[in-house]
Image (spheres, helix red, strand yellow):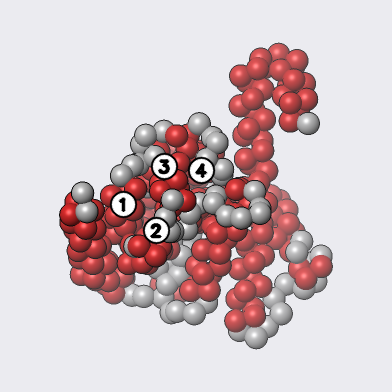
């Protein structure tokens, strides 16, 4: 079916390459849109059950179409631009937060058969791309010419810098054991032994805390703390511009959770079911824990957030990395 669609597009004058790219982008965007709608519904239902409520129930069976209705509402909303905003940067920010996310999603190997899965520095590329979104968040806050938005943008930059360090050190601890930055080889190393979450439990916890902070999820959602900053960096955004920031947030959750499943849970390895199904099941299990955390712990103060990263997480990550290096080196 996909081959027929590609041939039809190529017949329209796009050529084989153009048809393949267009079809790939359409498939990825279709799945990512479904993912965002599903995760918003899941978050509402999980939070409702934690608080002994039903959650969305009216639109569709068990409220399954509620997020579709919300999407249609956002599509119909007027997009307002503040008079004093830096218009070029203000309009560029939602695009810049969205495009790297799309690139990341296209690079996550689902079964190990993809060409990117065999790149020697695949892990470095994924981690580098995941950090670009903070630039767009700062641009959104700065260009809005709003004090709350500027504060949210500045908080986001300092938060990502602080929590990127333990996340990288946790990933590098896995790299030391696997002796490779190649994602396929990292998964293969777990196939021949045990999942790295059992060998590196400290690194797994550090990675999970780091990606929770990087995606601005509670209790680390300081850049958009509505009790302090109205809406933080996206205060002045409305309609689909506002939606693009949340599209990027939920897509980043999926991408970083899938990368975590690859590093610590064996990626696409598993019995009976196809590899992509196993990878997505593991990724959504990680996301479920992230949602569970949001509705369990209160938001940290900004000083507590920074202290937690610089005085606890980074030293622990460094010690774990050094111990792993000695253990790997001593075993040779």
To which residue does mark 1 refer? Answer: 177
Point out the image quarter for the N terminus.
top right
Please state which of the two labelled residues, at mark 4 or mark 3, is closer to the viewer: 3
Q: Disc 1 or 2, which lies upstream in sequence? A: 1
Camera-side residue: 326 or 91? 326
Camera-side residue: 39 or 114? 114
Q: Residue at x 43, y 79 (%)?
A: 298
Q: Residue at x 45, y 41 (%)?
A: 184
Q: Are marks 1 and 2 in contact (CB under 8 Å)?
A: yes
Q: Disc 4 or 1, which lies upstream in sequence? A: 4
- Name the side, left or right, on which 311 lies relative to 227: left
- Of helix, strand and loop, which one carries label 1? helix
Q: Residue at x 50, y 51 (%)?
A: 267
To which residue does mark 2 refer? Answer: 196
Mark 1 is surrounded, within 10 Å at the Cα level, by few (under 14), some (14 to 19) or many (20 or more) other residues, namely some
Q: Which mark is residue 185?
A: 3
Q: CA distance from mark 4 to mark 3?
A: 14 Å
Please state which of the two labelled residues, at mark 4 or mark 1, is closer to the viewer: 1
To which residue does mark 4 refer? Answer: 108
Camera-side residue: 98 or 289? 289
Q: Residue at x 74, y 26 (%)?
A: 3
Q: Disc 3 or 1, which lies upstream in sequence? A: 1
Q: Are marks 4 and 3 in contact (CB under 8 Å)?
A: no
Q: Disc 4 or 2, which lies upstream in sequence? A: 4
Q: Disc 4 or 3, which lies upstream in sequence? A: 4
Q: Are marks 4 and 2 in contact (CB under 8 Å)?
A: no
Residue 218 at least partly seen: yes
- Of helix, strand and loop, which one carries label 4? loop
């Amino acid at each position: 079916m996909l081959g027929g669609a590609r041939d039809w597009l190529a017949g329209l004058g796009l050529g084989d390459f153009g048809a393949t790219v267009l079809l790939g982008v359409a498939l990825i965007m279709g799945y990512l849109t479904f993912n965002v709608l599903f995760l918003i519904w899941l978050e509402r239902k999980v939070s409702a059950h934690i608080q002994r409520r039903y959650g969305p129930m009216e639109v569709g069976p068990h409220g399954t179409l509620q997020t579709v209705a919300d999407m249609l509402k956002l599509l119909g909303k007027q997009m307002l631009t503040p008079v004093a905003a830096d218009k070029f940067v203000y309009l560029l920010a939602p695009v810049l937060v969205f495009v790297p996310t799309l690139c990341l999603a296209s690079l996550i190997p689902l079964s190990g058969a993809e060409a990117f899965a065999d790149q020697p520095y695949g892990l470095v590329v994924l981690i580098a791309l995941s950090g670009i979104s903070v630039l767009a968040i700062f641009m959104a806050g700065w260009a809005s010419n709003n004090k709350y938005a500027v504060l949210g943008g500045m908080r986001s930059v300092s938060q990502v810098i602080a929590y990127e360090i333990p996340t990288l050190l946790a990933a590098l601890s896995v790299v030391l054991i696997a002796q490779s930055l190649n994602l396929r080889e990292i998964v293969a190393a777990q196939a021949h032994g045990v999942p790295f979450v059992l060998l590196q439990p400290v690194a797994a916890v550090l990675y999970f805390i780091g990606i929770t902070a990087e995606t601005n999820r509670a209790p680390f959602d300081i850049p958009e703390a509505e009790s302090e900053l109205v809406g933080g960096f996206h205060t002045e955004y409305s309609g689909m511009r506002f939606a693009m920031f949340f599209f990027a947030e939920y897509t980043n959750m999926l991408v970083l959770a899938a990368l975590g499943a690859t590093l610590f849970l064996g990626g696409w390895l598993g019995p009976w079911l196809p590899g992509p199904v196993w990878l997505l099941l593991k990724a959504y299990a990680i996301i479920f824990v992230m949602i569970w955390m949001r509705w369990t712990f209160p938001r940290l103060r900004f000083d507590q957030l920074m202290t937690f990263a610089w005085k606890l997480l980074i030293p622990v990550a460094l010690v774990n990395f050094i111990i792993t290096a000695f253990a790997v080196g001593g075993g040779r």
